[in-house]
Image: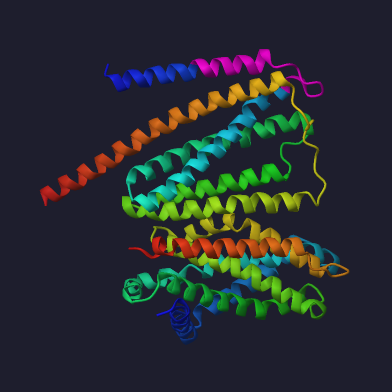
Amino acid sequence: MSSPGKANCAATLGVAILMGIAGYAALFVAPDERTMHEIQRIFYFHVPSAWTAFTAFFVVFICNIAYLTRRDLKWDWIAVSAAEVGLAFCTIVLVTGPIWAKPVWGIWWTWDARLTSTFVLWLMYVSYLLLRTLLPDAEKRARICAAFGIFAFLDVPLVYFSIWLWRTQHPQPVIGGGGSLDPTMRWVLLTCWVALLGVMILMVRQRYRLEKTRHEVEELTHAVEERVR
Amino acid sequence: MSIARAAALVLAKELRLEFRSRELLTTTLVFVLMVIVLFSFSFDPTSEEARTIGPGLLWMAFLFAGSLMLNPSFAREQANDTLCALRLAPVEPFGILLGKILANLVFLLLTELLLVPVFAVLYNVALLPVLGRLSLVLFLGTLGLCVTGTAFSAISAQARMRELLLPLLLLPVLTPILIASVECTAGLFAEPAELRMNWLQVLVAFDIIFLAASYLLCDTLLEE
């Protein structure tokens, strides 16, 4: 096996072990929550998934700016990889949220500020990825999507603020507990986040390679077509 | 040539083009009217209900209308590749974009000017006491819609399926505009009428941020 392959294997193994530790910590190490009990443990993957998704979307934004200033396609490849992985994590957040909410609040979904703004965020990055599929030319796709990505990211604080302002005027379910977090709980939460960040980096790297290979194949196909003609 | 002069020229061109055929204005007008009428079937259109649901209905109609009518703004330039000619002109790219934004603003405000009174009559809303403040809200909300919509129209014009794509790109991004405009309008329709200043600030912030972003990104948007 070549050395990048070995490094890849080692990284994957490392992240797998980390995920194992995180899962164990969330299920057995973290103390029982007084009012919600077992169901609260989903929180150790729900919240870090949200943080990881936001991190990924921030990476998309940085790469969008980098592409427009440097005009190097590799930034576009990182952007699409991070957007896809971020969207996957955002989906996890939107799925685990209702699973937790049903037993605790008694309802699957409420138009609470955080839920609603995460949903709008999810929709924005779905349209970002959709836009990519509708632009066939690589350079044009990178440029147009970078512009849209910047617009979308600039909108995120406005979306959060306006939905927060809108919802705080209306009654809403109390989000469990609040206030301070038990120190063990905080450690478990951070461990889970590190593990999920590892998964994110691994997946973005893998996806980046795929995008690069795809681009190379595209270039070769063009070259062959030119030659035949 | 200054940005203002370039924008004025593009605006004049857009207006001349539209008022020759008036096709964009008439279709949008009929579309919004239809939405307003058809929406009345989804709830009991008494004056009390209309006061709570009306503002949302009105802005949804404008948002949908905007996401449809902003499409030709750049798509129209594609048929004869006239955008290329515009770009070759020795003007600032932002002048071109600004001219188009202003033209779309004029079209959408004209539509609103004709349809808000119709809405007020159909849904029994007292318009006259709040006319000035409502105009301000309509202007700021529509400006945000047109700035973002025109920039995204330049994006979607270069893609396939552009007619369907523009609403998909635009509507999630316009969430803050929708909420803020609806809240402002609801405040004005309430008894007693009040202008909700914090929401007006959201509208102003959105307009400024997206105008600035369009200014910074216009080279990218208009590039071929």
The quadrant where residue A109 appears: top right
Q: Which residues are magenta?
A: A17-39
**Does any portion of residue A142 appear in the rendered image?**
no
Q: Is residue B64 left or right of residue A226?
A: right
**Residue B13's spot in the image, x, y percent?**
44, 83
Q: Is residue B35 left or right of residue B25?
A: right
The residue lying toward the viewer, choosing from B42 and B186, is B186
Residue ID at (38%, 76%): B91
Q: Is residue B75 above or below residue A163?
A: below
Residue A80: % across, % down: 42, 42
Q: Is A36 covered by the magenta stretch?
A: yes
Task: Please state the total of marks drawn on the protein image.
Answer: 0
Residue at 58% x, 54% y is: A155
Q: Is residue A185 left or right of residue B191?
A: left
Q: Is residue A36 above or below residue B20?
A: above
State the scheme by which the image is colored: rainbow
Residue drawn 82% across the image and 79% down it = B129
B61 or A7, which is in the foreground? A7
On the image, the x and y values in percent for residue B198 come to 75, 61
Q: Quadrant of the C terminus of chain B?
A: bottom left
Q: Nearer the viewer, residue B123 or B221?
A: B221
Q: Quadrant of residue B5?
A: bottom left
Residue A90 visible? The answer is: yes
Q: Quadrant of the N terminus of chain B?
A: bottom left
Q: Is residue B106 above or below residue B165?
A: below
Outermost residue toward the front in this view: B2
Farthest residue to the left: give it.
A228
**Main structural element of the magenta stretch: helix, strand or loop?**
helix
Which residue appears farthest toward the right when viewing the image? Answer: B192
Determine if the magenta segment contains residue B197: no
Where is residue B156 shown, x and y percent of the image? 44, 60
Direction from residue B83 to residue A41 in the image, left or right: right
